[in-house]
Image (tube, grey):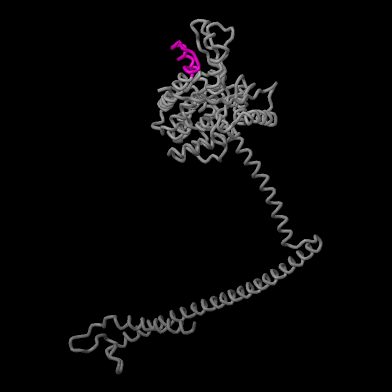
């Protein structure tokens, strides 16, 4: 600080001297001598007039006084600065003391906390980690309970909104596809021009009607009903073949066993062609584009199948229409949904030939005939045989339920009846040497046609007994079931 004051004083003196030297000198006479009456001499060796020298001395004295006062003020400020520095140092010392006290207090608190925890552990018999785990579990339970309650609340609100929206969408779709339903039966009626034809249909000693029933596997019911013959059977294809056979015989007028066989084979060929036409018409009505010919044929066969009394082909076409509209509403692929819905029951056309649920069988058929994986998956998942993974699979299941749930669409008892007849035929068909099996007379009789070169007469008698015992063990039925095994040998030659 003293060095700073000395420098300031030296600077002030230098500035004062410079100012004095810069002032103008007094005018001198032309001869070079100073003017004035009293001061005409120049100070010895200075070259400055005496009057001017006095003025400079006065100014220097004033400057010295100012510098003295300035020095005093600077010293006073220096003193105040020293005091402030001492105050700051004192405060730093106090703060250091407080920091040391705080650190010491903190250590004491930590030690006290450790002692407290040890005492708590001793009293509770638990370590800190165990107590922490208990608290965490309790908190988790509380949070889980609260979250579950919140989730249930959200789910209920979502379910209400979803139900309301789904009802609206389904109602709109169902109104756009307002189909009529009539539960189909297992009986067909053939009109007769006169009751005299009934005797010709029966034939001598019943040979004609026995031949018809043996070939077609359908019951021909000829009773007192005027002008009509009833054809009874659960298999729609068989019943249709029997109807066409009888109509051909009535048109031709010749009714005898040989002509019956000929008419039967003609009717069977016509049914095969008719099945393809029906399948193509179904594909056209469903508007799903091209379908493999084998799948078209299977679709046509569904025309002669029923599910709980509902025609399976009509059900499939309706499902295709519903699925296309529902997929458009829900943002799915209408083409995939409609295609899968049309083919979803295709497995029922071969269910008597292939083991397994019809949904899985249908999915395998779809893959075999180059349908897309999305279509095959939706077909397999419509009865939850596989987990649903696409929107289209859910839509197919929905429309399947919608179509079956319409009033009057299905009848439960008829389906049970048809299922029992299928089981009867399946039991008899498992035996070696069996060619054809027909469940007749509403399931009260099974007619088994065997291959004569594999089953002799003794084996035929034993076979009827075995089938009857298996039916007793595996099925429940009212009354009794007659098992008839038919073994026919023919010798044919030609006269030339």
Residue closest to the far left: 30
In the foreground, 303 or 254: 254
Residue closest to the far right: 123
Residue 356, by quadrant, is top right
- 103 shown above or below 20: above
Residue 202, by quadrant, is top right
For residue 256, say whether it is visible: yes
Residue 66 screen position, x and y as percent: 43, 79
127 relative position to 385: left or right: right
On whether residue 302 falls in the magenta region, the answer is: no
In the foreground, 317 or 266: 266
On whether residue 250 falls in the magenta region, the answer is: yes
- Magenta stretch, main secondary structure, is helix
Residue 339 screen position, x and y as percent: 45, 32
Residue 109 screen position, x and y as percent: 72, 67
- 193 shown above or below 468: above
**Residue found 18% across the figure and 86% down from its top:** 30
Residue closest to the far bottom: 45
**Residue found 47% across the figure and 33% down from its top:** 340
- 134 shown above or below 303: below
Of the 4 image quadrants, the one containing the C terminus is: top left
Q: Start and end of the magenta stretch?
A: 243-260
Q: How many marks?
A: 0
For residue 418, say whether it is visible: no
Residue 391 screen position, x and y as percent: 50, 37
In the foreground, 107 or 53: 107
């Amino acid at each position: 600080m003293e060095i700073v004051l000395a420098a300031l004083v030296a600077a002030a003196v230098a500035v004062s001297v410079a100012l004095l030297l810069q002032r103008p000198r007094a005018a001198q006479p032309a001869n070079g001598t100073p003017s004035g009456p009293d001061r005409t001499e120049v100070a010895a060796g200075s070259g400055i007039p005496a009057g001017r020298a006095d003025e400079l001395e006065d100014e220097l004295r004033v400057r010295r006084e100012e510098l003295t006062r300035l020095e005093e003020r600077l010293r006073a400020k220096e003193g105040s600065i020293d005091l402030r520095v001492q105050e700051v140092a004192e405060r730093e010392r106090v703060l250091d003391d407080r920091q040391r006290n705080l650190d010491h207090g903190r250590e004491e608190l930590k030690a006290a906390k450790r002692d407290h925890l040890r005492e708590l552990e001793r009293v509770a018999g638990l370590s800190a980690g165990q107590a922490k785990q208990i608290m965490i579990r309790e908190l988790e339970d509380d949070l889980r309970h609260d979250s579950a309650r919140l989730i249930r609340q959200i789910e209920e609100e979502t379910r209400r909104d979803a139900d309301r929206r789904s009802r609206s969408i389904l109602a709109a779709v169902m109104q756009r596809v307002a189909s009529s339903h009539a539960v189909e039966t297992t009986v067909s009626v053939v009109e007769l021009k006169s009751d005299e034809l009934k005797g010709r249909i029966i034939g001598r000693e019943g040979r004609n009607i026995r031949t018809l029933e043996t070939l077609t596997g359908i019951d021909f019911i000829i009773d007192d009903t005027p002008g009509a013959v009833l054809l009874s059977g659960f298999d729609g294809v068989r019943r249709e073949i029997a109807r066409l056979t009888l109509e051909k015989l009535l048109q031709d007028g010749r009714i005898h066993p040989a002509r019956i066989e000929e008419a039967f084979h003609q009717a069977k060929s016509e049914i095969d062609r008719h099945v393809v036409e029906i399948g193509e018409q179904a594909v056209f009505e469903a508007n799903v584009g091209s379908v493999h010919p084998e799948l078209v044929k299977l679709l046509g066969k569904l025309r002669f199948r029923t599910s709980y009394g509902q025609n399976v082909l009509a059900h499939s076409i309706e499902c295709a229409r519903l699925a296309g509209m529902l997929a458009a509403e829900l943002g799915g692929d209408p083409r995939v949904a409609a295609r899968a819905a049309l083919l979803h029951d295709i497995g029922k056309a071969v269910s008597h030939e292939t083991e397994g649920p019809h949904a899985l069988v249908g999915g395998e058929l779809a893959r075999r005939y180059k349908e897309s994986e999305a279509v095959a998956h939706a077909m397999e998942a419509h009865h939850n045989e596989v987990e649903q993974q696409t929107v289209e699979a859910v839509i197919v299941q929905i429309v399947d339920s919608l179509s079956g749930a319409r009033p009057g669409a299905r009848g439960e008892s008829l389906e049970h009846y048809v299922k029992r007849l299928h089981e009867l035929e399946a039991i008899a068909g498992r035996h070696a040497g069996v060619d054809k099996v027909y469940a007749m007379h509403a399931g009260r009789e099974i007619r088994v046609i065997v291959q004569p070169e594999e089953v002799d007469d003794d084996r035929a008698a034993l076979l009827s007994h075995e089938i009857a015992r298996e039916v007793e063990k595996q099925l429940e039925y009212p009354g009794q079931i007659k098992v008839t095994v038919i073994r026919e040998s023919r010798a044919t030659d030609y006269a030339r």
